[in-house]
Structures are given as structure tokens and as C-alpha cells.
Amino acid sequence: MVYLRPTMTAPVPAELALDRRTALPEDYTFLLMDHPRPTWEGHPNNGQWCQFWLARHNMFREFGEGLTDACKKLLAGEVEPKGFHEWFMTRVSFFLGELDTHHKIEEYHYFPLLTRSDARIGKGVDLLESDHHIIHELLRGAYDTIVALDGAIQEKPNEVMGLVPRMHDDLAALDVGLQRHLNDEEDLIVPLILERSEADLGMA
Ligand SMILES: [Fe+2]
Ligand SMILES: [Fe+2]
């Protein structure tokens, strides 16, 4: 369910790496001043693709928070390992698989489309692709822990609680990076869609 990602991305300034930046510079978000977040909902150019894409991002935000929270509850003894296992495993597998697919679709289809449509977004797209690589590494780490936790719950119950803090930390690190990435990706891409329309960009 987790794929190798062979593509290379252009280098981005070190201070703008996913784990270091706190916001995007204005020259990256060149249309955000004209199309700030409060104007997005109901904008005539906020079409079906954009609404679906933003809904997927919100789903990823909810999964990231919910799964981390579930680990906290298990650690606090608020849920039983067996009940946790049933609830957690299907959701975390779905989350990681869908996130990986989402990134691939962006990288292979929508990022090149956007860069061809407006060269000014090129360095922002390079940044987003570099984010994807960092998130992918976090995702692989979390996946390895999930496999270990799954095996422990089924066969070595006395090792479960020793693995849960690692699972929590892996998911929390993934969640922090993902939230930053989703916010910045939206600030880069949505204003361009609102400025030009999905049809004009070839997204409709
Ligand atoms: Fe992305
Ligand atoms: Fe995305």
C-alpha cells in the first residue's frame, strides 16, 4: 500500500524545508493577497475539482488528529488494546494509502499542469514536492511501527504498550508535517484556481 517514490525534486532553500518553515514567503504566495482564504468559499471559480480536493485535505487533517488521539487514549488506559486494534488498523491503513495516492496524483498530474499554466508557481511546486518526500519518509516510518504494533496486538500482547508511544510519536510527527503542507499547498494552489478557473487551467 505504500509505494517507493523514485522522482527527484529541485532543491529548496533550507529555511523553507517542511520541518523548519512557519509560513511561506510572499513571493511564493503571489496571488494569496488577491484571493485570501475568507473569499474562497462560494467563489465562482471554486469549482468541483477544488471543492473535492479541499474536502480530501480536510479528511486527511481529521484522520491525522483522530489516529494520534486514539494512541493517546490507549496509553491513558481509556480503551482496551483489542478494541483499539479493531478501530485503528483499518483506519490507519486507509489513511496512509489514500495519502500516498493523493500525493502521486498531485505529482504526476496536477503539479505539472499548474507549472505549465503559470511559471510563477514553479518554485512553490518544487517546495510541495520536497514536502511530499519528507512526508513519505514519515509515512514509511509510521507504517513500520503499525506492522510491529499489529503483530504485537495479535501475538505478543505484553509488548503492545511498549510500542504505543512510538506509534503515537510517529503519527504526531506525520500530522505536524502534513498540517503545514496542506495549509501551504492550499495557499499556493487555490488562489491560482480562483484567478484563472479550473477550465482555463485544464483541471475541469
Ligand atoms: Fe500535497
Ligand atoms: Fe494535497
Image (spheres, rainbow, N blue to C red):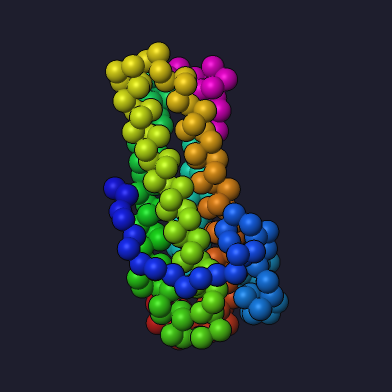
Report the number of numbered marks: 0
Residue segment shown in magenta:
69-81
Residue 163, quarter of the rendered image:
top left
Percent of width and height locating residue 24 = 65, 67
Which of the pair 66/160 is nearer the observer?
Answer: 160
Residue 19 visible (yes or no): yes
The quarter of the picture where residue 33 lies is bottom right
Residue in view at x 37 percent, y 15 percent = 157
Q: Residue at x 42, y 20 (%)?
A: 160
Q: Is residue 122 above or below residue 78?
A: below
Q: Is the magenta region chiefly helix, strand or loop?
A: helix
Position of residue 70 in the picture relative to residue 89 (left or right): right
Is residue 79 found inside the magenta-colored segment of the image? yes
Whether residue 189 is visible to the viewer of this picture, yes or no, is no
* Residue 154 position within the rendered picture, expressed as x and y whole percent measured from the top left: 30, 20
Residue at image location 55% in from the left, 73% down from the top: 124
Q: Residue at x 35, y 70 (%)?
A: 108
> Residue 17: which quarter of the image?
bottom right
Q: In what quadrant of the picture does the C terminus appear?
A: bottom left
Could you tell whether 86 is left or right of 35 in the image? left
Whether 154 is drawn above or below 166: the answer is above
- Please state the horizontal and vertical placement of residue 115, each as a whole percent of the image: 46, 81
Viewer-nearest residue: 88 or 51: 88
Q: Is residue 101 magenta?
A: no
Q: Position of residue 58 (x, y in %)?
A: 52, 53
